[in-house]
């Protein structure tokens, strides 16, 4: 593709993955958000919970100056606490729902335009009950968000049997779920992630085409799955080209091509495409971020 990628998308980065010490809502949040906001390669940033109210105020202030699209990732609210939005224990489900509603409030406070979460673990013998619980919770979240503004709600499609072992899940089930939610909720969509495709054992076409009309957000990153003994095995989001990993420039090229073919990338309303990359071990976040930019630039030139 000879045209600038910024014409077709808003390139973003998931702040709490690039700087994982901030994932629990603490740490050098303001300093690292400011670093991203000062980098004109990025037109979007995805942030998560910020426990300190003064830090939230400062982050909102810097984001307000940045001319960036802001998204809120609520995944850490669930993954770092063990909460499950499709918990068959009603008290557990309500606790997870309460945390996500608090996240929606915080997302509005920070000026976010979208809010993402993930489904929880499940047991095969009670899978349909877990599905029903997820539908109930998601509709409640969508209605709650709509009562406060026009924020979009998205569910990120995760692996179902390797690492996070989330209910949603393979493309066919994500399609069923999105169709069920959108019967009543117009502010809902799906988030697809290149990092998760190897874990789902799906190609870009297999993962994207069945849900093409429901995708409102996308992530790009990498995964290791050949052997559990390998470094960064599972859903660890290592940098592109990490040893024994699945995704590098060729896989990103195919992912971008399919998203371009279905009209996800467009010049009228460019969507957010965010890096979800996490430094491994002693890797430097700044180098990992720069590496990711190089991979995207090279892949886009080949689309």
Image: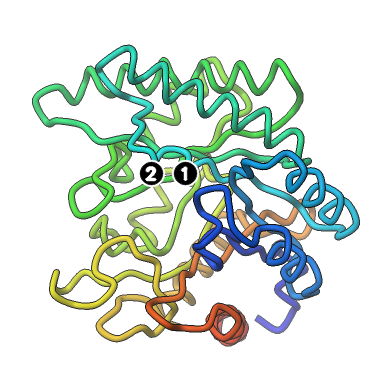
Question: Where is mark 2, residue-wise?
Answer: 79
* Nearer-the-camera pick, 99 or 205: 99
Question: Where is mark 1, residue-wise?
Answer: 75
Could you tell me residue 28's position as x and y percent?
A: 64, 62
Q: Which quadrant would the N terminus be assigned to in this image?
A: bottom right
* Nearer-the-camera pick, 254 or 28: 28
Structural crowding at the residue carrying mark 2, measured as other residues with C-alpha within 10 Å and reported as few (<14), some (14–19) or many (≥20):
some
Which residue does the image show at 47% across and 39% down from the upper left? Answer: 77
Callout 1: SS: helix
Structural crowding at the residue carrying mark 1, measured as other residues with C-alpha within 10 Å and reported as few (<14), some (14–19) or many (≥20):
many
**Vertical relation: 7 (above or below) 297:** above
Which residue does the image show at 30% across and 40% down from the upper left? Answer: 172
Residue at the extreme right of the image, as rendered: 65
**Vertical relation: 79 (above or below) 177:** below
**Residue 241 got which mark?**
none
**Vertical relation: 254 (above or below) 114:** below
Contact between labelled residues 1 and 2, with CB atoms less than 8 Å apart: yes
**Vertical relation: 59 (above or below) 236:** above
Could you tell me residue 53's position as x and y percent?
A: 73, 39
* Nearer-the-camera pick, 33 or 51: 51
Could you tell me residue 90's position as x and y percent?
A: 31, 12
- Occupied quadrant, residue 141: top right
* Nearer-the-camera pick, 89 or 140: 89
């Amino acid at each position: 593709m000879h045209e600038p990628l910024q014409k077709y998308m808003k390139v973003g980065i998931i702040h709490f993955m690039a700087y994982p010490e901030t994932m629990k809502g603490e740490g050098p949040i303001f300093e690292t958000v400011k670093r991203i906001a000062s980098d004109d390669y990025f037109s979007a940033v995805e942030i998560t919970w910020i426990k300190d109210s003064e830090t939230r105020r400062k982050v909102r202030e810097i984001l307000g100056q940045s001319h960036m699209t802001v998204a809120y990732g609520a995944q850490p609210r669930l993954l770092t606490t063990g909460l499950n939005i499709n918990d068959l224990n009603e008290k557990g489900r309500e606790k997870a729902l309460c945390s996500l509603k608090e996240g929606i409030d915080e997302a509005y406070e920070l000026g976010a335009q979208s809010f993402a979460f993930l489904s929880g673990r499940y047991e095969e013998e009670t899978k349909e009950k877990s599905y029903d619980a997820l539908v109930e919770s998601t509709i409640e979240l969508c209605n709650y968000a709509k009562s406060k503004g026009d924020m979009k709600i998205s569910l990120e499609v995760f692996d179902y049997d390797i690492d996070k072992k989330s209910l949603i899940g393979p493309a066919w089930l994500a399609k069923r779920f999105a169709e069920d939610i959108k019967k009543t909720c117009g502010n809902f969509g799906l988030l697809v992630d290149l990092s998760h495709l190897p874990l789902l054992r799906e190609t870009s076409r297999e993962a994207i085409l069945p849900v093409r009309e429901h995708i409102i957000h996308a992530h790009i990153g990498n995964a290791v799955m050949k052997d559990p003994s390998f470094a960064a095995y599972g859903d660890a989001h290592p940098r592109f080209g990490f040893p024994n990993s699945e995704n590098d420039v060729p896989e990103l090229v195919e992912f971008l091509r399919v998203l371009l073919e279905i009209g996800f990338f467009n010049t009228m309303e460019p969507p957010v495409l965010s890096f979800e990359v996490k430094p491994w071990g002693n890797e430097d976040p700044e180098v990992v971020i720069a590496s990711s930019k190089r991979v995207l630039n090279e892949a886009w030139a080949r689309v």
